[in-house]
Image (spheres, rainbow, N blue to C red):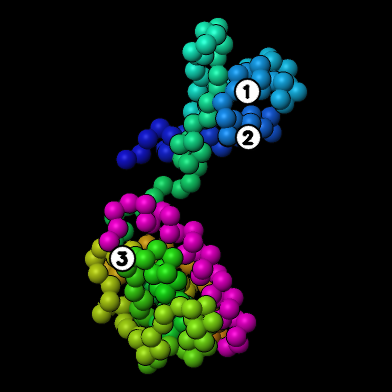
Amino acid sequence: METELTSLAGRARIHAALGDPARLAIVDALTLGDASPGEIAHALDMPTNLVAHHVKVLTDAGLVVRGRSEGDRRRTYLRLQPAALSALAPPPLADVHRVVFVCTHNSARSQLAAALWKRRTDGDAASAGTRPAPRVHPRAVAVAHRHALDLDPTGTAHVDDVVRDDDLIVAVCDNAHEELTGPIRPRLHWSVPDPVRVDTDEAFEAAYADLADRVDRLAPAATSGDTR
């Protein structure tokens, strides 16, 4: 469920509040512990009235809350709200049960992406092609071996035989993204250059690195909800 913090407007307010170097310095100072406004002013060598202004902006954005001291009741302490910083990340993808990576021939990029996903998340993943080749490209098998990925050299398949209604479909090539406009349609598109066109170990390593980075970015959003 979207909250005030995770809404686009709420996230924009947080970004705006953090856009001033002084306010970012205050957030940094509160990351590991609480402090009074006076302590913040002393630590950052900042006038107290300026601290008060910046604290109000941070408070209005939901980044900081005030609490009364249980000792000297005249003193207040500032505390960072970690949930506000967490809200800066894009919202999670709901109801992701299995991820299917699709490319044209299902011989390189989609195979590597599915293997990377399984290793990164221990979640369910598959791969498919719009025009599957009879086997996985030997250089894809080789790069998988170099990075200790489990990849079946003969295991290619057509999208019609793999995709289910509740799958998260990720097109890892432009052709598949543009071709799949019917009932089977990618939800996400990764424009990963085709290493087969260049057909060198360097091109396959570059594709592997690109896919690994994208898998690492997608995993927290797709595995934070109900997955199986």
Q: Residue at x 58, y 34 (%)?
A: 32
Magenta-drawn stretch contains 212:
yes
For the residue pair 79 and 9, the one nearer the viewer reads as 79
Label 1 amino acid?
Answer: His
User: Farthest residue in the front direction?
Assistant: 71
**SS at mark 3 in the image:** strand
Lower sequence index among marks 2 and 1: 2
Q: Are marks 3 and 2 in contact (CB under 8 Å)?
A: no
Name the residue tied to disc 3: 98
Residue 78 percent across, percent down from the top left: 55, 22
Give the CA distance from mark 3 to mark 2.
38 Å
Mark 1, residue position: 54
Q: Quadrant of residue 176?
A: bottom left
**Marks 3 & 1, CB-CB < 8 Å contact:** no
Q: Tell me the chief SS of the magenta region.
A: helix
On the image, numbered disc 2 is attached to which residue?
Answer: 28
Query: Rounded to the nearest whole Å, what is the CA distance between mark 2 and mark 1?
Result: 13 Å
Counting every numbered tag in the picture gives 3
- Residue pushed farthest right? 45
How far across and how far down the image is residue 218, in percent? 45, 59
- Read off the magenta span: 199-228
Comes first in the chain, label 3 or label 2: 2
206 drawn magenta = yes
Q: In terms of secondary structure, where does tag 2 sit?
A: helix
Q: Compared with residue 183, is residue 60 higher up or lower down, i.e. above or below?
A: above
Q: Position of residue 6 (x, y in %)?
A: 42, 38
- Left/right placement of residue 64 relative to residue 2 reads right
Q: Which mark is residue 171?
A: none
Q: In 3D space, how far apart are the residues under numbered discs 3 and 1 (Cα atoms)?
A: 45 Å
In the image, residue 216 above or below residue 135: above
Q: Position of residue 127 (x, y in %)?
A: 36, 76
